[in-house]
Amino acid sequence: MIKIIIGREPESLRLKLVSGKTTKLMGEPGSVPKGVSREHAAITVDDNDRIFVENLNGSNVTFVTGKQFDIMKCEVGLGDTLFLGQCRFPVTVESVVHSFVKAKVEVSHLEWIWNDYNDFNLKEQKKMQRLNLWRTVSSLLTTTAIASGILLADSLKGNNPFKYLYGGALVIMFGITIWTFLQSGNAEKKRERLERFQEEYSCPQCGVYFGMMPYKVLVKRGKCGNCGAQFKTPQGNHRNYPLRH
Ligand SMILES: [Zn+2]
């Protein structure tokens, strides 16, 4: 369980969050009105990740979105906004909670995105390998035809059956040319596929692109390098914070 006390820092007039021995200040100096007490309200996150807000003093007033009445204690969600004091100074529950508890996000859908993109790349690579194979065959035929003319010129006496290899090489080169022409839209397709991947293979919390880090490595790392959001492990059975939409 974690308890975060929310109040006004009296000198800078910034929002002050205190949990245990850690103090964090939020917002611009002078942004918090005097209607907010030094220790105004507290948010607790219990072991089941349920979030509660309570007034720390009977004379304090705290409103919660959707309920629009002042509270002494109630359960809230990450999407809720607290309004402190009669001046209704707004503070989102998420900003308070995530100052001390890193968000937990579901990333299992990234496995499919990763595999799908790599399958696409593998197919493209195989296509290029086949193309290179045909190029090799074509030049092998040409080389054999030329070599036979040089090496076997005396024994074949002008009747060289290997000359037909030129024909085979010609047919293959013609095929490669047509294939290359048909594939001319392929670069565009590849670029679009990469762009889609860069958009999809990203942190659900902050949207940063995970690059070419394989899904398995990502899961092993356990959290987003950018925003610190923790990845929900597939075998985890604890309740997680709802995702931000
Ligand atoms: Zn992130």
Image (cartoon, rainbow, N blue to C red):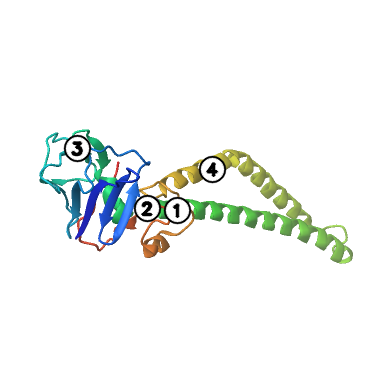
x 37%, y 56%: residue: 228
Quarter of the image where the N terminus is located? bottom left
x 23%, y 54%: residue: 4
Is the Cβ of the residue at disc 2 closer than 8 Å to that at disc 4? no
**Residue 183's image quarter?**
top right
- 51 left or right, relative to 146: left
Q: Residues within 10 Å of mark 4 (few under 14, many from 20)?
A: few
Numbered circles on residues, count: 4
Label 1 – label 4 distance at C-alpha: 18 Å
Which mark identifies residue 110?
2
Element type at marker 3? loop
Element type at marker 2? helix
Is the Cβ of the residue at disc 1 closer than 8 Å to that at disc 3? no
Residue kind at label 4, given as amino acid type: Arg
Residue behind mark 3: 85
Residue behind mark 1: 210
Residue behind mark 4: 191
